[in-house]
Image (spheres, grey):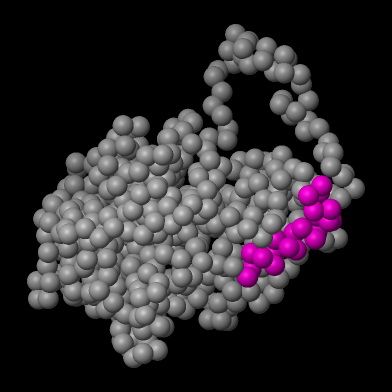
């Protein structure tokens, strides 16, 4: 496993595998960068690094699609895999399993070092000006320029027992203030409440452009009071180097590109949004009041790079760097509950509104319960945990289905889910992410909704023996398959690209 310790090492890796385009043409901060990013996502084009942005000085650069999906055959998930220390050719299942293994390793506390590259430029007090940073207007209809779409917010409880690294969008208000979503059922909301309970603002540090694995862990639904930085240390087997902030009692990754420090108010709010979001919609409407971040310092590297995610129709980083770690935590959590889980995945096209869970092929011998009972146990455990909070729909299949292949998932749902008759297990009044697209206003306010487990396991009467799959790989001898593959182009057919990639 290769630990890339800063964003620039990651950019070098992307160049090496053809996953980075360096844009020298002048672009506008308003909409150009967002539109190019959306085109990158929707065509599977490489990530793009902009260094010539009109009106932006100081050498600042912007990186888009840092964890997008590639159209390169065999390297669809190259950016995800490299971020996680794996080869560019790693599969979705391999990436998920790597993060699951990381949960079983001994966490390693970060190492505090005297200084780091994030301190090459330091501005405090009156020298602070957020407007110098290249926060772009991402969508036509956004309520402002969003600085944080792919960075982590570092916060610590007043008793210093829990340091949380999480991702939530943050919009620039003016040169010294920002605002953004602070959901009370998310970890940043819990830490913020702990400070509000003692009548004080919450110290924060916004870390933009850390090493590439950090945003994946920031989006991973680790349980409350588990420190993300300790998990990263355990995952790679070595401590993360951190430095102390200038104006708040927090530590941040030493190699971060940009760090914004300050205090999240417990009383002040400012108008925020709307914003095009991960469900694929931008709802026009007035801004809403969100807590105010008052900025006390900005530090950054020379020629700093701001990575951004342009949320919208999948796939983009909400679906990759959030969806994939969420799948890993689902697997880990369900296995810890002694359930026979093979793997999990959120099909990118579902915009994080589905997860598919594959159970071991021999699960019946392990549990000796009906399929509906296994699905009920999965739902009860998931919906009592952070791992199951954000997504409303879950499909449970046998591990003969490649759940990273949407074609197979649709086929399994169509042919194995029996409407009624325990085909859908409904769970009412469950905690939810308020950005789920179909929620009504009352559900968004209460952050409670109905969730469902779709039982797509083979019907109980099939028993342990599945019917043969009537496919090329399923009903032809290996000798015939090998002969056809060896002679495919000789028959006159063009080369075939693996449809799962």
Please report the residue visible at 61 percent of the width from the left and 41 percent of the height from the top. 405
Residue situated furthest bottom in the rendering: 199
Q: Is 253 left, or right, of 318 in this rendering?
A: left
Q: Which residue occupies the extreme right position in the image?
A: 461
Which part of the image, by quadrant, shows the N terminus? top left
Q: Image quadrant of residue 123?
A: bottom left
Residue 41 drawn at (x, y percent):
41, 46
Indicate the quadrant where residue 371 lies. bottom right
Residue 270 in sight: no
User: Relative to residue 450, is residue 500 drawn left or right?
Assistant: left
Residue plotted at (12% across, 56% down): 120
Q: How many marks?
A: 0
367 magenta-colored:
yes
| Residue 151 visible within the image | yes
Residue 474 magenta-highlighted: no
When the figure is inspected, residue 117 is found, relative to residue 411, above or below; the finding is below
Which segment is the magenta one?
Answer: 364-384
Instruction: Farthest residue to the top: give it.
Output: 490
Judged by its main secondary structure, the magenta piece is: helix
* Residue under the image location 31 percent in, 51 percent down: 211
Identify the residue at image location x=55%, y=18%: 494
Does 69 appear above or below 495?
Answer: below
- Relative to 125, residue 222 above or below: above
Question: Picture coordinates of residue 330 (x, y %)?
Answer: 59, 57
On the image, the x and y values in percent for residue 422 come to 82, 61
Where 215 sits versus 433, above or below?
above
Residue 64 appears left or right of 453: left
Left or right of 216 on screen, residue 456: right
Residue 342: give x, y in percent of width and height: 65, 46
């Amino acid at each position: 496993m290769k630990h890339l310790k800063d964003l620039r090492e990651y950019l070098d890796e992307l160049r090496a595998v053809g996953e980075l385009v360096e844009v020298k043409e002048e672009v506008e901060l308003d909409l150009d960068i967002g539109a190019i990013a959306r085109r990158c996502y929707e065509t599977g084009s490489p990530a793009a690094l902009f260094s010539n942005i009109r009106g932006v000085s100081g050498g600042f650069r912007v990186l888009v699609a840092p964890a997008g999906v590639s159209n390169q055959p065999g390297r669809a998930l190259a950016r995800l895999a490299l971020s996680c220390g794996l080869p560019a050719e790693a599969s979705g299942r391999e990436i998920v399993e790597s993060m699951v293994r990381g949960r079983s390793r001994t966490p390693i506390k970060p190492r505090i070092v005297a200084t780091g590259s994030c301190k090459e430029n330091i501005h405090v007090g009156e020298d602070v000006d957020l407007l110098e940073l290249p926060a772009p207007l991402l969508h036509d209809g956004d309520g402002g320029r969003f600085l944080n779409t792919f960075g982590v917010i570092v916060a610590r409880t007043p008793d210093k027992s829990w340091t949380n690294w999480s991702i939530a969008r943050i919009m620039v208000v003016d040169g010294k203030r920002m605002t953004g979503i602070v959901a009370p059922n998310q970890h940043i909301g819990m830490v913020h409440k702990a400070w509000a309970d003692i009548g004080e603002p919450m110290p924060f540090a916004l870390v933009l452009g850390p090493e590439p694995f950090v945003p994946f862990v920031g989006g991973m639904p680790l349980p409350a009071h588990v420190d993300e930085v300790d998990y990263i240390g355990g995952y790679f087997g070595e401590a993360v180097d951190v430095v102390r902030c200038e104006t708040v009692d927090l530590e941040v990754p030493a190699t971060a590109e940009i760090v914004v420090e300050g205090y999240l108010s417990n009383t002040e709010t400012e108008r925020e949004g709307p914003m095009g979001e991960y469900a694929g919609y931008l709802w026009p409407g007035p801004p809403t009041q969100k807590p105010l971040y008052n900025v006390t310092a900005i530090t950054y590297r020379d020629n700093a790079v701001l990575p951004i995610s342009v949320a919208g129709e999948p796939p983009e980083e909400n679906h990759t760097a959030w969806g994939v770690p969420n799948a890993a935590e689902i697997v880990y959590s369900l296995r810890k509950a002694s359930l026979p889980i093979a793997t999990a995945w959120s099909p990118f096209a579902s915009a994080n509104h589905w997860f598919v869970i594959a159970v071991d092929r021999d699960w019946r011998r392990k549990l000796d319960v009906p399929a509906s009972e296994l699905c009920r146990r999965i739902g009860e455990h998931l919906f009592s945990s952070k791992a199951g909070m954000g997504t409303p729909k879950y499909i449970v299949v046998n591990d003969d289905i490649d759940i990273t292949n949407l074609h197979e998932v649709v086929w399994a749902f169509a042919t194995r889910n029996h409407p009624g008759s325990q085909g859908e297990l409904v769970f009412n009044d469950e905690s939810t992410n308020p950005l789920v697209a179909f929620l009504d206003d009352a559900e968004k306010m209460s952050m409670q909704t109905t969730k469902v487990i779709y039982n797509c396991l083979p019907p109980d009467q099939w028993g342990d023996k599945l019917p043969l799959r009537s496919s090329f790989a399923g009903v032809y001898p290996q000798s015939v398959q090998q002969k056809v593959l060896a002679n495919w182009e000789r028959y006159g057919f063009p080369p075939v690209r693996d449809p799962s990639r």
